[in-house]
Amino acid sequence: MTESRILANPRADEAPPLSHAELEEQLRALGAQRYHSLHPFHRLLHGGELNRDQVRAWALNRYCYQAAIPIKDASLIARAEDRDLRRAWLQRILDHDGEGEGEGGIERWLRLTDGLDLPRSYVTSRRGALPATRFAVEAYVHFVRERSLLEAVASSLTELFSPGIISERVSGMLSNYSFISPQILSYFEKRLSQAPRDADFALDYVKRNAATRSQQQAVIDALSFKCDVLWAQLDALYFSYVEPGFVPPGAWTPGAEQA
Amino acid sequence: MTESRILANPRADEAPPLSHAELEEQLRALGAQRYHSLHPFHRLLHGGELNRDQVRAWALNRYCYQAAIPIKDASLIARAEDRDLRRAWLQRILDHDGEGEGEGGIERWLRLTDGLDLPRSYVTSRRGALPATRFAVEAYVHFVRERSLLEAVASSLTELFSPGIISERVSGMLSNYSFISPQILSYFEKRLSQAPRDADFALDYVKRNAATRSQQQAVIDALSFKCDVLWAQLDALYFSYVEPGFVPPGAWTPGAEQA
């Protein structure tokens, strides 16, 4: 909740900074332990063990995350004095919102929810999303607005790990679910090229800008926070739509369209 | 996420406002459907069906909520031009923080976690709390900071329903758990007199200040949001410590004190 200001100068008693390679190693080790590819919900999703309504619940809730990404990215740009950072980061907004009607990542996500017969107005209203999904997504937006710019950039680093999960997801979903086609998974195909470009930029940025050990720790903690944001969304899906299957009041209930 | 400004003047096509009695009736009906007294976790807690570690998980996580309350209340006061509102609201901060060492609601909550053998430094660090708990609590703080003042006040109205749950909780926990004593439940005894005073003030405030139907709807929606904040915390506890019992990476695990 509170902004922990990153020290501009190392304290005398502070450990020496990690090398760039060591920092990257620690970030990748964190991903190997905490990235949401390890969550039981994803194992069910990719392994074809969910029913269609459970896949619908996933797509409906994950829309909230997609919809917040350009807002998060604009919040970051709005705080950046560095024009190069702003220029590079702008591409993310273009990727998600697209340059016109029918374009962009959010539109491609809506093709997935279309393909799962979820009415667009219901999806975009977010009325049926789990409160826990909304709270996790909002925590991410507020983190980017309130923490240091270094931490805001670092919180995007989960994209280092996304090509792996996307490949597994696309092949797993196509081979396991008759109601999933390559067309409705077009979102992920684009992300396979966009995510590594974005992650490379952000990784380079945190290496260059985290000069002290405490700044480097803040970078690691920001990535850990972001892993929590992704993980918590799957916890909530599992709880409400897999086991024990308690849907909170007002959230989407399979069979009741509420659209 | 975005501030939805409440109209100062009713639109011509807007429904006429509810009477004060009708508004109160709708707020109470919402509580009867959505207040977290109805959550399965509370039924287990009060009915003596949790083990000691599950009660510890509840006390550890709920600390995050307690700790955020004065910050939430100070955020509200910081936005209020009305001196009477500020004066009345200040009592809430005094109640939670106390006027000195060893006083106040947060201190009394820590007597509960002390009594459950949770180290204070571990509890107050919030390191072991579930990410979903932190996200729900932060959503509440941000709601109070970002929405209209009317909505901020209205989001406190869950206290209309708290005396019922507190009485049930205290008697249920004392009769069912050998490790719970009246002393370590002293937090709740105080709240039995504080909550109705606070709720009466807030209810009167929203009746007087929600002049249009859309403002009244914003009041109802704010209470609904707050019910979601409370409910989501219990969903997360149930998921991680009751069924299916998946603890997210880094959160408190029974048996591993991590203090």
Image (cartoon, coloured by chain):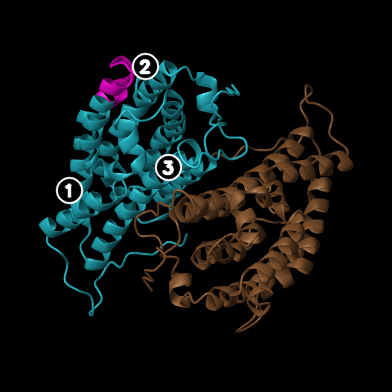
Chain colours: A cyan, B brown
Cα distance between the residues tagged 1 and 3: 28 Å
* Kind of residue indicated by mark 2: Phe
Secondary structure, mark 2, is loop
Q: Are marks 2 and 1 in contact (CB under 8 Å)?
A: no
Look at mark 3 in the image and give the residue it sits on: A233
Cα distance between the residues tagged 3 and 2: 23 Å
Secondary structure, mark 1, is helix
On whether residue B32 falls in the magenta region, the answer is no
Q: Residue at x 30, y 15 (%)?
A: A183
On whether residue A179 falls in the magenta region, the answer is yes
Frontmost residue, B114 versus A20? B114
* Kind of residue indicated by mark 3: Gln
- In the rendering, at what x and y percent does residue A209 appear? 22, 56
Q: Quadrant of the C terminus of chain B?
A: bottom left
Find the magenta span and give its range: A173-189
Q: How many marks?
A: 3
Frontmost residue, B182 versus B230? B182
Q: Give the numbered dot on residue A179.
A: 2
Residue A91 appears in the picture as rendered? yes
What chain is tagged by disc 3?
Answer: A
Q: Is residue B251 above or below residue A85?
A: below
Residue B90 appears in the picture as rendered? no
Look at mark 1 in the image and give the residue it sits on: A204
